[in-house]
């Protein structure tokens, strides 16, 4: 009976987090404010217009091992500002491959519940979160998301 109650609670928490994820890929006002937060975090950056152009990468949800990993591995010649919509990982391992050396990646949110999120970031790329992170009985090395009994790990790759 105790296991049933725990599973039911976990299921309800999962549904709550999934409902928090916006499903539209269209840019909206909160996306612009997230971009502005990341730009303020970086301070010095190559985007000088008041409303810089940026790409949007859609939300990812991975529950019980079902779902897709996110990959952005096409190098660009110019700095590329990318907004990554909120993602949720529950009882799974999610991978984010942010491998564009000219990438300026802005995380709008990342939640890991009883799971693990691994971010592989190109050594020359930049990463910021539009909001502060939090950890509840888990591991969140760089405060780039929320970890509840889970972990979020960022590893730099292709460093020479």
Image (cartoon, rainbow, N blue to C red):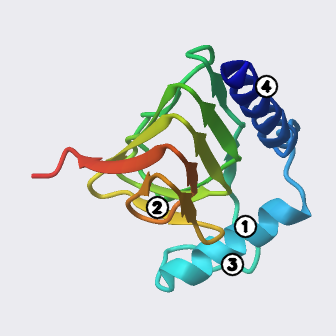
Q: CA distance from mark 4 to mark 2?
A: 35 Å
Q: Which residue is mark 4?
A: 8
13 on left or right of 119: right
Tell me what residue is drawn at x 61 percent, y 49 percent.
110
**Residue 122 or residue 118, whichever sits in front:** 118
Q: Are marks 1 and 4 in contact (CB under 8 Å)?
A: no
Q: Which residue is mark 2?
A: 127
Give percent across and percent down for residue 97. Answer: 42, 36
Tell me what residue is drawn at x 90 percent, y 64 percent.
29
Q: Work out which residue is located at the far top of the displayed protein and give it.
A: 66
Which circle, 2 or 3, is nearer the viewer? 2
Which circle, 3 or 4, is nearer the viewer? 4
Q: Which residue is mark 1?
A: 34
Nearer the N terminus, badge 4 or badge 2? Answer: 4
Q: Work out which residue is located at the far front of the displayed protein and give it.
A: 1
Q: CA distance from mark 3 to mark 4?
A: 48 Å
63 on left or right of 73: right
Q: Are marks 3 and 4 in contact (CB under 8 Å)?
A: no
Q: Quadrant of residue 63?
A: top right
Give percent across and percent down for residue 127. Answer: 46, 61
Q: Which mark is residue 49?
A: 3
Crowd around label 2: few <14 · some 14–19 · many ≥20 (10 Å): some
Q: Quadrant of residue 37?
A: bottom right
Q: Quadrant of the N terminus?
A: top right
Give percent across and percent down for residue 78. Answer: 46, 56
Q: Are marks 2 and 3 in contact (CB under 8 Å)?
A: no
153 vs 140: above or below: above
Nearer the N terminus, badge 3 or badge 4? Answer: 4
Crowd around label 4: few <14 · some 14–19 · many ≥20 (10 Å): few
Check disc 2 and report its element: helix, strand or loop.
Answer: strand
Check disc 4 and report its element: helix, strand or loop.
Answer: helix
């Amino acid at each position: 009976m105790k296991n049933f109650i725990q599973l039911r609670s976990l299921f309800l928490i999962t549904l709550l987090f999934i409902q928090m994820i916006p499903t539209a890929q269209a840019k909206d006002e909160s996306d612009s404010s997230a971009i502005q937060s990341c730009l303020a975090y970086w301070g010095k950056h190559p985007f000088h217009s008041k409303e810089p152009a940026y790409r949007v990468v859609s939300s990812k949800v991975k529950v019980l091992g079902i779902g897709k990993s996110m990959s952005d591995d096409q190098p660009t010649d110019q700095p590329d500002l990318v907004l990554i919509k909120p993602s949720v990982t529950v009882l799974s391992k999610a991978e984010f491959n942010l491998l564009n050396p000219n990438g300026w990646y802005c995380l709008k949110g990342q939640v890991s519940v009883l799971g693990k999120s691994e971010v592989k970031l190109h050594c020359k790329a930049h990463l910021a979160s539009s909001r502060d992170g939090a950890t509840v009985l888990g591991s969140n090395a760089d405060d780039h998301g929320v970890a509840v009994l889970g972990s979020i790990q960022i590893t730099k790759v292709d460093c020479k």
